[in-house]
Image: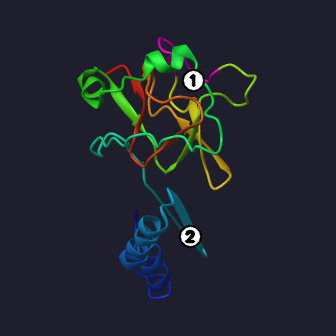
Amino acid sequence: MAVSKSPAAKPAAANSDQIDAGLVRSLADILKDTELTEIEVERGDLRIRVAREITVAAAPMAYAAAPAPMSAAPAAPVPAAAAASMPSDPATIVAKAGEPVKSPMVGTAYLKPSPEAPAFVQPGDAVKKGQTLLIVEAMKTMNPIQAPRDGKVVEVLVGDAQPVEFGEALVLLEA
């Protein structure tokens, strides 16, 4: 980029050639504090967009026991297929090959968009990056959990309507 040396053009060139590092850092801090993935600011001709990509493979695996059903309400029967796909021993899950897709929040996992609909994915299904694998409901908000990359579903690690913890492995994708 060429910068004119004329006195009239110098202040404008200085403004457009310099990026306010403090502003960029402030925007990055806002992203971190609010857990947003993207923010954009426009001032005159200057437009700054700061974005981040969240990876789920960095956090260590954490396991929590499923809460016991409340005695006041009868427990819903777990389908045999879901029970067979959920090993009771956490060591069994760790030994399986695959990349875990983890829950980004505490909530309730739903494998289907509605009770009468088929599951989003089954073991053996090929998935594309961004495809919905399941839903985690938190505070009456349905949050789709999407595939972080293309791959094949090795195993679904949670049952339908099962409570999940932050960072809990939900689905294993082929490594």
Task: Identify the residue at image location x=45%, y=15%.
Answer: 84
Identify the magenta region: 119-127
Residue tagged by mark 2?
A: 41
* Quarter holding residue 86: top left
Q: Tell me the kind of residue under disc 2.
A: Val
Vertical placement of 82 versus 5: above or below?
Answer: above
Task: Identify the residue at image location x=59%, y=71%.
Answer: 42
Q: Nearer the viewer, residue 20 or 173?
A: 173
SS of the residue under disc 1: loop
Vertical placement of 29 versus 157: above or below?
Answer: below
Q: Residues within 10 Å of mark 1 (few under 14, many from 20)?
A: few
Q: Position of residue 145 (x, y in %)?
A: 54, 38
Q: Position of residue 85 (x, y in %)?
A: 44, 18
Vertical placement of 94 versus 85: above or below?
Answer: below
Of mark 1 and mark 2, the one earlier in the sequence is: 2
Q: Is residue 153 visible?
A: no
Marks 1/2: CA distance?
Answer: 49 Å
Query: In the displayed structure, does residue 94 sit left or right of residue 75?
Result: left
Q: Position of residue 100 (x, y in %)?
A: 36, 32
Q: Tell me the kind of residue under disc 1.
A: Val
**Hey, which residue is sitting farthest front in the picture?**
71
Residue tagged by mark 1?
A: 78
* Quarter holding residue 20: bottom left
Give the main secondary structure of the magenta stretch.
loop
Q: Nearer the viewer, residue 117 or 31?
A: 117
Vertical placement of 150 versus 17: above or below?
Answer: above
Task: Identify the residue at image location x=23%, y=23%.
Answer: 95
